[in-house]
Image: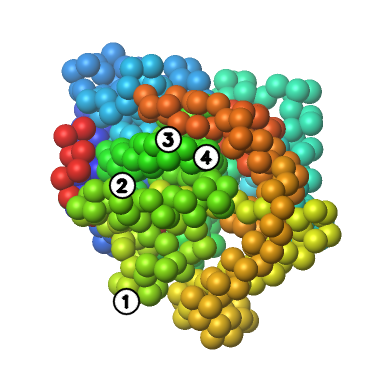
Amino acid sequence: MTQAQIEALNLLRLLDEICQQEKINYTLGNRALMNYEAQQSDEYLDPNGIYVCLLYEDYVRLLNLLEESAAVYGIEIITYQNMTNFDALSAWVLRSGKNVLPVGREEDECYYKTRIILTPMFYAGNTKQECRKNCKLIEHQFNYIDCRWPLEHKHLFGPIKNKIIRTKQRYYCRNKHKYNYCVHGLIEELKAGTYGKEYLVYKDIENTCAWMRIEEFVTERINFYGVAACAIRNKKGFLERNYKDLMLDDWSNKVSELQLKGGRDLRRVQLIQLELMKEIDRICRKHHLKYNIAFGTLLGAVRHGGFVPWDDDADINMPYEDYLKLIDVVEDEIDHEKYYFRYQDKEADCNITYAHFKRNGTVYTKRNREGFKYHPGVFIDIVPLFNGAPNFFLHKIQTRICSIFRTACWAYVGADSERNPLMRVYYQLLAKIGNKRAYRLCIKAATFFTKKRNKMLFLNALDRDPYNIAFVRRECFDDPIELDFEGHKFFAPRDVHGVLDYCYGHDYMKYLPLARRVPKNDALIELGDLYSDI
């Protein structure tokens, strides 16, 4: 078991002892209940996904008890009332301890600590119709509370499903001001239900609800990974009713190793990436090379003053001519005992069209890549931008050609693991080109235009084909600004708003919904003793 899992189970043990002493009835919910019913191993236990569900009045009572004795128990309580950007009906119970972030970023600390999720259940009517009405009420209001503007510059002809989703997003954002929905108002509306109702409902992951009949809220003692806990007796019926689709897909997947190991290992990955960024910054400044921090790294600098708390990668963009100069000088500049610069000409199984700067003595790689010959360490992305086409028509042709050869570079990796049979055949055909030849053809197409125009070509977001917008303008590199990131100054585009608006939408300063504030990469991790003292 990982340290994070042990911490989560110790928190559960504490909550169970308090509930038994105070005669508060509760049940495990969500994935924790599925873990128990399916008798899944430790690899399926998300340390930050243990739900403790209880009636609203007991939820309030338990929160009060915890808050009164928080210092004694060594815990912290996070709710919508004491933390901004925490739009949830539930509360997080965290083990207090050593902070891992600089002073001034206290609100971000909770994402690096192991938590138990306390979830209130509300009375939801005497019939299924009334219950479903309350489920719809919760989902409806959270559609507005969590809504974000969809990204612009998408393809005109895309999947119909995506078009519908994006249309809904725009509708919620445009009409949000009319209703001013908030968590407090929703709780007041839900708790107005009288006692004696037949159904209970609670908000689940993402924007869904789970429900049960009040007569099902009869619990029994179980052994949950070595900890005595309570769970409803009719587990199978409850899970099949509320999680039927997930039981066939998501619930059967192992939890990513980074989530298993918890927030401290995530922070260690970030600190290693920061070390790599500082080294690249040193080399670029010494040799007068242009670069900008990009994507989540740029968003983190603007919104958090450092890494986005749940982000596990770092990105740098460079004009292609500076990128080539970096390749020429980097081997003479770096300490080869500590660092490794990865690019196509250096590895037999390199499947990327950009570069990775890596830390030796670490592992941070996707599963099932053991048979490939490449450096597996923690890395940052260094992505070149090329001279742009003179008009949009030629731009579209160029990006489509590059897209085919870019896919061919990594097709041999995914050819056997792709589930869709048609896509698997497509990848197998592309793989016949060979990754080295595909890379040469991709670069040949990317460098076809030699004139240095203000508009540049970016190849790593081909689904959106950015053309002549702030994100791909040469002036972003010719006239950069410096932003503070984790206490160090890095170059960034002067038109920060324009770049972030393209990458993350008009409301890029708004946090993602709580359920999506998790590391996105499912990677195998070994960090040695680097930054183990945090």
Q: Amino acid at mark 2?
A: Glu
Residue position marked by numbered label 2 in the rendering:
333
Few, some or many C-alpha atoms within 10 Å of disc 4 (few <14, some 14-19, many ≥20)? many
Q: Earlier in the sequence, mark 2 or mark 4?
A: 4
Q: Amino acid at mark 4?
A: Lys
Q: Earlier in the sequence, mark 3 or mark 4?
A: 3
Separation of disc 1 and disc 3 at Cα? 38 Å
* Marks 1,4: beta carbons within 8 A: no
Q: Residue 310: give x, y in percent of width and height.
A: 42, 39
Few, some or many C-alpha atoms within 10 Å of disc 1 (few <14, some 14-19, many ≥20)? few
**Lateral position of residue 459 relative to residue 79, left or right:** right
Q: Image point 77% across, 65% down: which residue?
A: 397
The label on residue 285 is 3
Up-down: is 394 above or below 149? below
Separation of disc 3 and disc 4 at Cα? 8 Å
Secondary element under disc 1, as helix, strand or loop, is loop
Q: Earlier in the sequence, mark 1 or mark 4?
A: 4
Q: Image point 22% across, 25% down: which residue?
A: 98
Residue position marked by numbered label 4 in the rendering:
290
Separation of disc 2 and disc 3 at Cα? 12 Å
Q: Earlier in the sequence, mark 2 or mark 1?
A: 2
Q: Report the quarter where the C terminus lies.
A: top left
Q: Nearer the viewer, residue 494 or 57?
A: 494
Q: Image point 48% across, 64% down: which residue?
A: 352
Separation of disc 2 and disc 4 at Cα? 17 Å
The label on residue 371 is 1
Q: Is residue 315 visible?
A: yes
Q: Is residue 233 visible?
A: no
Q: Image point 32% across, 22% down: which residue?
A: 102
**Lateral position of residue 285 relative to residue 74, left or right:** right
Separation of disc 1 and disc 4 at Cα? 36 Å
Q: Earlier in the sequence, mark 2 or mark 3?
A: 3
